């Protein structure tokens, strides 16, 4: 018999009754029933109930066993009484009578329990992550992640993609976030960088002639943490293809993501209709470039109904250039109580509030518009608004005004809140949308400087000709995939022509010399025959987060950082020794007090 186990803790069933077996695992729970000890023994695969009474030679030793001790037992498989069968576990029809027990590893007093799913402070959980990972929910999430990655690989290979690895130590590159720098010992005063993404390398793979590439790639960005983003590192499905258009990329990626979600969605419906929505329309309709399409509410511009109206706040706003009034329809939201609650929500988000109109049955039995706005603008304008929004009795509409960039994000959150509150947001479904036609450039509101708004390596729509006019009107062949309010995929058709690349960077304030210095390898490669190419990257952590139905990305990462980008278990970041600093010719400047 094997030194530690003949079976796992998920193997045994009625067919094994009477057999002598050996199991090994962790003591999940101990129950003393007065002369009979019951222990749930747990390993990676499952749980088996084992027991001993006072006649067992192992009884005295078992009395000393505590939760999370690692033990190996020899025993005989017995059938449980019919009334004691546990249908929730595969081994629920049997139990093992213990004849011998060995302690393989004792456990001290636990800083957090493993049995059950108690709500413990995250700092404690991350400090003792190796214990936290023993809990069923986290264990299942890590196995989900492993199976998702395996499935992605199989699907990509089946789609004729080839997996290649790119360097982890490289040069610094302006990818939109801060680099993690690595000092060079052999080249004092110079630094490598951990790659924010394999962007340049995967493009060079295309230039080298390897048509369809993918990689489960680690990426490193020194970012401020959020619930749906790791502050240091993450993994992405990195994809690049040659001789493709934007639609070719969509056609290659959709079956992979669609199939993946269908495989692991556990009964949720995966909508096969993936609409393409222009970036400007997404911001207008949903207040976000990663819309949650489970919520059917679409916002609309209603400025014409308030221009010159009796509602002075909106009327005066509209006299300023670049301002508009948007409406958030709220079907079934037609009560003053609900409208006041949503108004308070807007105030919590930092706005003065939201104007509203709701439609109800009047004293004469006819439908009437109610609320402060309705009184100010009169029945003709309120009726025009109702008709435009397609609303009726029992419905409401909320209004925000000003420059869209100032209120768009709050409007998007209000739309989501209204959809949830009114039960309009569909449950048990994944809805996807490609967001397309992103602007290539944006202007800093403080400095007026033009810079890239998205991926700097994207091909502008219209090529060189598009770059001759107003940069803020240039659209790129850039796209994101949104799912249920999260960005899952981001990508672009690449700028593979050096003259267009130099011009694109020039508009963002980067001279030719700087472009060649920062991206010399890629610029050089493009001078020797670069194919049209494009691709994307899908966030593995975020995909698993959605499939695991959790809003916290740390719940699907094996060893995550905390909110302050600290590894509490390994005590990182830590101070370098003087010897290390001398070797690297570095000096630490103490932080200002």
Image (cartoon, rainbow, N blue to C red):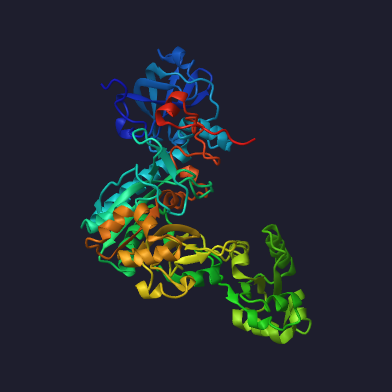
Considering depth in this image, is 202 or 13 the residue closer to the camera?
A: 202
The residue sitting at 56% across, 35% down in the picture is 123
Q: Which quadrant: the C terminus?
A: top right
How many numbered tags mark residues here? 0
Return the residue nearer the eye: 473 or 96: 473
Q: Left or right? Give the position of 482 relative to 318.
A: left
Residue 206 percent across, percent down from the top left: 25, 58
For the point 53% across and 47% down, the residue is 224
Q: Position of residue 428 (x, y in %)?
A: 48, 59
Q: Is residue 362 above or below residue 11?
A: below
Figure quadrant of the N terminus: top left
Point out the residue furthest to the bottom here. 380
Name the residue furthest front. Answer: 513
Vertical side of 108 occupied by 268: above or below = below
Residue 375 appears in the rendering: yes
Q: Nearer the viewer, residue 281 or 477?
A: 477
| Residue 362 x %, y % | 76, 81
Tell me if residue 31 comes above or below residue 126 in the rendering: above
């Amino acid at each position: 018999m094997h030194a530690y186990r003949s079976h796992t803790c998920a193997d045994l069933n009625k067919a094994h009754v009477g057999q002598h077996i050996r199991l090994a695992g962790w003591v999940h729970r101990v129950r003393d029933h007065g002369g009979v000890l019951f222990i749930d023994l747990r390993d990676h695969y499952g749980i088996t109930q084992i027991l001993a009474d006072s006649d067992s030679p192992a009884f005295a030793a078992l009395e000393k066993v505590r939760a999370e001790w690692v033990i190996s037992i020899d025993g005989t498989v017995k059938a449980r009484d019919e009334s004691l069968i546990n249908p929730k576990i595969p081994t629920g029809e049997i139990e093992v009578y213990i004849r011998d027990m060995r302690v393989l590893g004792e456990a001290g007093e636990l800083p957090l329990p493993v049995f059950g799913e108690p709500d413990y402070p995250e700092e404690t959980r991350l400090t003792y992550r190796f214990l936290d990972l023993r809990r069923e929910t986290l264990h299942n999430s890590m196995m989900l992640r492993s199976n998702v990655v395996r499935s992605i690989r199989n699907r990509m290979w089946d789609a004729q993609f080839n997996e290649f690895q790119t360097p982890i130590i490289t040069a610094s590159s302006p990818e939109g976030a801060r680099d993690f720098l690595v000092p060079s010992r052999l080249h004092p005063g110079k630094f490598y960088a951990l790659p924010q993404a394999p962007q340049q390398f995967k493009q060079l793979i295309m230039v080298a002639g390897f048509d369809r590439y993918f990689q489960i790639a680690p990426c490193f960005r020194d970012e401020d943490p959020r619930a749906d983003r790791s502050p240091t590192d993450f993994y992405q499905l990195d994809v690049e293809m040659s001789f493709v258009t934007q639609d070719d990329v969509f056609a290659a990626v959709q079956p992979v993501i669609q199939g993946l979600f269908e495989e692991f969605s556990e009964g949720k419906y995966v909508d096969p209709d993936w609409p393409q929505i222009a970036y400007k329309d997404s911001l207008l309709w949903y207040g976000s470039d990663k819309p949650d399409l489970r919520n059917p509410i679409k916002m609309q511009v209603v400025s014409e109904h308030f221009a010159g109206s009796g509602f002075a706040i909106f009327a005066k706003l509209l006299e300023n250039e670049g301002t508009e009034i948007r409406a958030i329809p709220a079907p079934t939201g037609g009560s003053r109580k609900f409208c006041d609650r949503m108004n308070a929500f807007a105030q919590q988000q930092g706005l003065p509030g939201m104007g509203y109109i709701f439609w109800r049955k009047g004293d004469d039995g006819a439908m009437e518009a109610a609320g402060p706005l309705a009184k100010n603008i009169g029945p003709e304008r309120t009726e025009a608004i109702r008709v435009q929004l397609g609303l009726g009795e029992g419905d409401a509409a909320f209004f925000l005004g000003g420059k869209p960039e100032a209120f768009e994000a709050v409007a998007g959150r209000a739309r989501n809140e209204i959809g949830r509150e009114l039960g309009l947001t569909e449950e048990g479904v994944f809805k996807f949308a490609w967001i397309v036609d992103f602007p290539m450039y944006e202007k800093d509101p403080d400095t007026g400087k033009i810079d890239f708004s998205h991926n700097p390596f994207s091909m502008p729509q219209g090529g060189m000709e598009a770059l001759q006019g107003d940069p803020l009107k240039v659209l790129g062949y850039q796209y994101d995939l949104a799912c249920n309010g999260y960005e899952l995929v981001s990508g672009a058709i690449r700028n593979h022509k050096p003259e267009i690349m130099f011009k694109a960077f020039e508009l963002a304030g980067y001279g030719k010399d700087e472009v060649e210095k920062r991206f010399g390898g890629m610029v050089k490669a493009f001078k020797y025959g670069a194919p049209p190419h494009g691709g994307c990257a899908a966030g593995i952590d975020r995909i698993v987060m959605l499939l695991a139905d959790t809003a916290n990305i740390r719940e699907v990462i094996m060893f995550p950082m905390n909110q302050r980008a600290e590894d509490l278990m390994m005590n990182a970041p830590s101070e370098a020794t003087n010897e290390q600093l001398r070797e690297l010719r570095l000096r630490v400047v103490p932080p200002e007090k």
